[in-house]
Image: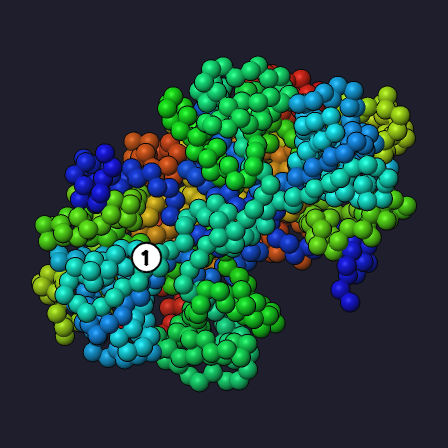
Amino acid sequence: MAANNLSAVIETHGSAVKLLRNSKIGMYVYPVVAAEFSNWRSEQVAWRKSAVLFDQTHHMDELIVEGPDSAAFLEYVGVNSFANFDLNRAKHFVPVTPAGNVIGDMIIFREREDKFVLVGRAPTANWVRFQQAIGKWKVRLTHDPRSDSRPDGKAIYRTHYRFQIQGPDANKIFDKLNGGPVPDIKFFHVDWIKIGTRRVQALRHGMAGAPGLEVWGPYADKHYIQSTILEAARDIGVDLALVGSRAYSTNTLESGWIPSPLPAIYTGGGMLAEYRDWLGADSYEATGSIGGSFVSDDIEDYYVNPFELGYGFYVGWKKKDFIGKDALLKMKDEKHRKKVTLEWNRDDLLKVVASAFEDGTPYKWIDFPQPNYASTNADLLLNGNKPAGISMFNGYSFNERCMLSLGVVDDDIRIGDQLTLIWGEPEPTGKTSTEPHRQAEIRVKVAPTPYAREARENYADSWRTKSAT
Amino acid sequence: MAHKNLEDVLKAAKNPVDLLRNSRIGAYVYPVVPAEFSNWRDEQAAWRKSCVLFDQSHHMVDLYIKGPDALKLLSNLAINSFANFPVDRAKQFIPCSYSGHVIGDGILFHLEKNNLVFVGRAPSANWIQFHAETGKYRVTIKKDDRSPSNPKGNAVKRISYRFQIQGPNAWQVIEKLNGKKVPEIKFFHMGAIRIKGQRVRALRHGMAGAPGLEIWGPYKEREKIREAILAAGEEFGIAQVGSRAYATNTLESGWIPSPLPAVYTDERMKKYRKWLPAGSYEATGSLAGSFVSDNIEDYYVTPYEIGYGPFVKFDHEFIGREALEKIAGKPHRRKVTFAWNGEDVTKAFGSLFTGTEEEHYKYIDLPLSNYASSSFDKIVDKNGKVVGASMFAGYSYNERSMLSLGIVDPNVQLGDEVTLVWGEPDGGTRKTTVERHKQLNIRATVSAVPYSKFVRETYAAGWRTGT
């Protein structure tokens, strides 16, 4: 009989590492949105120099949590303090395992006293659903999974459309749309603005130091809202670029968020063993992939804790209880790896590119602008010959004219240090996203997060900036 | 005011060259099919080493032509002979303008008596449709346009699905599907196989020297048929090919998919230009590359130049015959493959990491490097003289080389080193696919068509090999 839950799938494959490193799921796709609207270089430039429209309708799960216990339930599941969580605010919601390792993250919006909307990758949505299933909370959940990775001509339906308008000229567009200055929404606060005949909710967000808004509403309004935004930009002469799926995920290289930590749920007994039985064989956790040169027999070596990702200051220590509290309390004052940006060496990169034009086995192809080849990436970083960290998310930035990656490095590594990133996998795996290749050594320079100076200096004081020093 | 037709659009533009070189339509997309199933390197390797499934259901126009005058109409438009074209035969149909320049090409299937379908890019389909509607032919036309380039999550519908099973193991997959030996079908003849107990029509095709089939049927059966092919193909290493790798297969086999339709000039074509809508391929398409001339006719090619000389048959009347008769025996530019110098290609990539706008070379996207619906890059000899043009470019993992297909002057020899000028002058045109850049000279070796030694030595004798 076919394995019908994650526990059985792991057993079939021998271990979680074997399962994930040999996953056949293919690339982690940003679905439905066109690959390029203009070209990915110009689209990247637009978020730095004019304005962009990100279509975030399709690549994230959405989970609605409603009911009298909603706030208490989510406070228990996530590490975050809800002390300041007024209506019409958003937070960066991070749940950890009882052992204190990160499961994932989602943006959480408080729409009503008793209603929250969570948006992000599947692992957090799944974990929240599980907690509801095993708990006795008075909450009701509605789960809208991300769009099909390969719709292949089939119609796609979501509950909501979701757009971000970002960049230095974004405000001009909002003012035009709103028929006057938009309310001065604070960072990660939500208010209502006018788009055409609709009043829509808008979250103040920002990227690369410039202001921006995220707006959402019923999926049926998507076309109307998008064309109204484009028309407003045209009317005031703002060069608003639609960003395609090839450029989209690289924006985080400049701003410093790591989208793809491995959910730390493959080990642990009790609640976690039960979770693995609960998770379907077709879940993200059972089908996802790990790619990269970092290989360990122990899946726990791929886990990260919230301190390492720069989320330490989210933790609501004053909360009576939440999953992972004890573990985090113990970890709190220990030394932690820290999040950094890595700047890849040009000559070493070109050696990889050049191998595509030579006979023999080439180095692993570096796809531009998004070289990731798994849902979770783990490339080994060496300081001399000594392991010094893991590179976790790659991307080329035309704005910085540089290949960058985000990762975690040992506490004693300093900005400006040179490390070596091992690119490519040591042995052939079952992943369909990798061609036969050999490994390359790529020198990388440790740089701050966010990498973009504008983002670093002007971005709202937040987790992005609380990292390496 | 919005323009109604191509003639209006051209009147408003300075020059057709200027219009097309600055088209805002974006990249020429191979729609709907996922970008990659596995990864484009392995997908390319599979058509050489095991077998592949191409999903051709979306990127071509299907034009159904029915009626007692269907063959007469098509014969009047084609350089090809219709002398030996019974039912269950297909041919590469090539229409020319009155001046003897190529309008396009595609595959014409003789499905039944008085019932044919043309499958290919829009320009040939439009030209056939125009003559069907405006000429005195007893025909009816049904056009099934290609799928939208950006479906935006909406359902996509075609009349037919269209698959190819190709590669060295293709025939084994086909026979396994069929449940028994498939009787020999000659190249470009049609037959049928059985899939899941159902009769499916098939065109004998081939790739890399191995026989393959193109099959089609009602679109709603696409899933079922695909699943059957993948299941049968598993043991033979079948790989689905995504839209990133798909179009690059031609670099190894030598067909140029994208000649500029020769419709923008000539009084005799004016009626057609007034018929062609302002939203047509011809009015919205784009032209890219380093070759720039004020005269759009400099971008036209004759059938002789792109390897269709053997197809030109003066055994019938057809549009363009007079012009072609005049040039038939003369020397022509001819089709070749350009193998790009790897160091120079790497140099183009190097500019991604150096710095400034002034230093940036036009990005070479792998594996498909075109950035317009028609491409025209200058080929220059060692004396600086323009001796040809590169017309379709991309990377072949099988050959570990950037390759492009194009044409060269008669005196250029195989093995000659030439320079391909990559990128557009003056920082680039206003096409949305173009970031500001400077031009780069890339060394290239003039090579045979098909490039692949394997293909060249084993492919069915025909236009590809010029025999």
Left or right, residue B18 beside residue A393: left
User: x, y (%) of residue A199?
Assistant: 53, 26
* Residue at the image position 73 percent from the left and 48 percent from the top: A285
* Position above or below: A121 against B141: above
* Residue at the image position 33 percent from the left and 38 percent from the top: B24
User: x, y (%) of residue B171?
Assistant: 49, 76
Q: Under tag 1, what secondary structure?
A: loop
In the foreground, B449 or A100? A100
User: x, y (%) of residue A33?
Assistant: 51, 43
Could you tell me which chain the residue with mark 1 belongs to?
A: B
* Residue at the image position 37 percent from the left and 51 percent from the top: B393
* Position above or below: B32 against B432: below
Left or right, residue A325 beside residue A364: right
* Position above or below: A177 against B347: above
Left or right, residue B249 beside residue A376: left
* Position above or below: A122 against A226: below
Q: Which residue does the numbered mark 1 point to in the structure image?
A: B121
Other-residue count near label 1 (Cα within 10 Å), few / some / many at <14 / 14–19 / ≥20: many
Amino acid on which the number 1 mark rests in the picture: Arg
